[in-house]
Amino acid sequence: MSEGKTLDLKTVKEAVSGTAVAFRSRVELQPAGGPGDKVFPPTYEGATYATEARRLPGREEPVACVLLDSVQSQANRMEEALQEAVDAGRIRIPLIEVDFGQANQELLKPIDDRITSLTVPHRLADAILRDSDLEDGTAFSKSEHAEYWRKASVANATPVYELCPTALIFGIWGAPEKPGGLGAKFERLMSSEILGMEVAFGTKTSSRIDPLGIRAGIGIYDDGKGNWTLENTGKKYGRNRETAGKPSAINHGNVTPALAKYGKNPEGLDPMKDFRERARQGEIAPGGVTMASAEQTTVVSLAGLRRLKFPPKGEKWQPSDGQRRRDLAARTVLASLALCAAELAAESGMDLRSRCVLWPSAPRKWELLDAPGEEPVQLAIGAESAIALLNEAVSGAEAVGMTWQNDPIRLRPSEKLVNLVKRSQELAATAEEEGE
């Protein structure tokens, strides 16, 4: 493998304009507590982990693996890292902001004062943006911005580049009126996931010693107003069938140490299949995993990037030297933005969730998958260099007329959106009071 190359603008341009397939990064990780320490993957429906058998290099047989962070979750973490860099003044990229400051005065539970196109689930096509208004009262979905975006396609990615370039990197499908449907569809050009390999399932324990010494045999009842009482009203307090009517329903009393065990499997039984089935039946509770290793794999597709075309506003794409320069400049910016997102996310650390903090065993390296059959070219870049690379790429694009929206497009939630949130919060409060 070639070594010693710096991932600079010249390298990115050559990769984008040539026949290279992708930039790739594979980072070996270990638990922050050290090799062999338990980590907790995300749980899905049925309180189970996303497990599967995978064929891995150097292993003759498929090995048990567990997903520690999904492609979607990784994309969200990278967008959050970009948002933090924007807020810190380290980078400038197009943003659409929704200001909930005034709306929060009407809500039972305040939400974030500012929600942006980097923090909403569906990026440019998100319903929060759709149901918000410009400062002059025009609905975003009816604005000139939406009308411009409505004409976007793979053959005309300029509107999305100017309004929300991260949507071209992480993918988007939708129109100003709604996600999906007949709207423009841009495939994900950057994917990343974290996988735990050769895993063993753990056990989950729980216990609590009550300093007041409240005994479990005392009856706890509902007073009819959503509060607990010791008077026997005939209705047990609590929503959980196992704890209803007991001090544990109101978080008092001891919790007896409990252990959910996962023992050996019968000969020839798929351990992951058995684990999932027993978890669904309530025989066991997922209690974390230990693993031989973990790895983050990140891929930026240059082949996919080259499908995007960027004609001037109001024009159709036509082959010309000027158009080719525009296309190359925009694609170089997007590749640089993807690399910057990955490096900023890595810089912020990998605290994925409670009891799942990972640490890279070695500095991140990138590989350029170029000529078929040849060893990938090894490259290196850190967060600060990635920011410089992005800024240089943006300047180069501006020089050939590829500009984007530098100042945020500011919105405020529409009255009906505020009422929807308010009604939902009132319903949630009522459900809690009624013990639903």
Image (cartoon, helix red, strand yellow):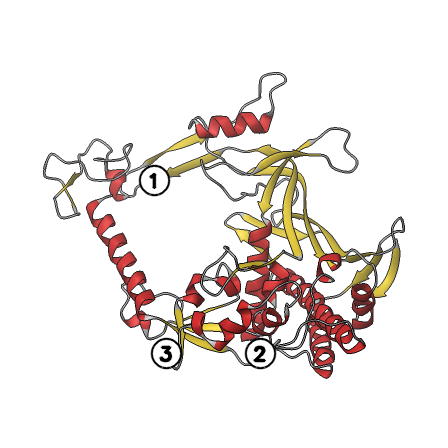
Question: Residue 280: x percent and y percent?
Answer: 45, 29
257 on left or right of 352 = left
Amino acid at circle 3: Gly
Mark 1 or 2, which is nearer the eye?
2
Q: Residue at x 28, y 65 (%)?
A: 419
Residue 362: image quadrant is bottom right
The disc placed on residue 209 is: 1
On screen, 430 above or below 411? above
Please tell me how crowded label 2 is: few (under 14), some (14-19), or many (20+) other residues with Cα within 10 Å: some
Q: Which residue is mark 3?
A: 137
Residue 272: image quadrant is top right
Amino acid at circle 2: Gln
Q: Secondary structure at mark 1?
A: loop
CB within 8 Å, label 3 to label 2: no
Question: Residue 102: x percent and y percent?
Answer: 33, 75
Q: Residue at x 27, y 35 (%)?
A: 243
Amino acid at circle 1: Ile
Please count the marks in the image.
Answer: 3
Q: Quadrant of the C terminus?
A: top left
CB within 8 Å, label 1 to label 2: no
Q: Residue at x 54, y 74 (%)?
A: 87
Q: Which residue is mark 2?
A: 405
Nearest the viewer among 270 and 351 is 270
Please tell me how crowded label 3 is: few (under 14), some (14-19), or many (20+) other residues with Cα within 10 Å: few
Query: What whole-number distance in Å separates the C-alpha atoms at marks 1 and 2?
Result: 57 Å
Residue 46: image quadrant is top left
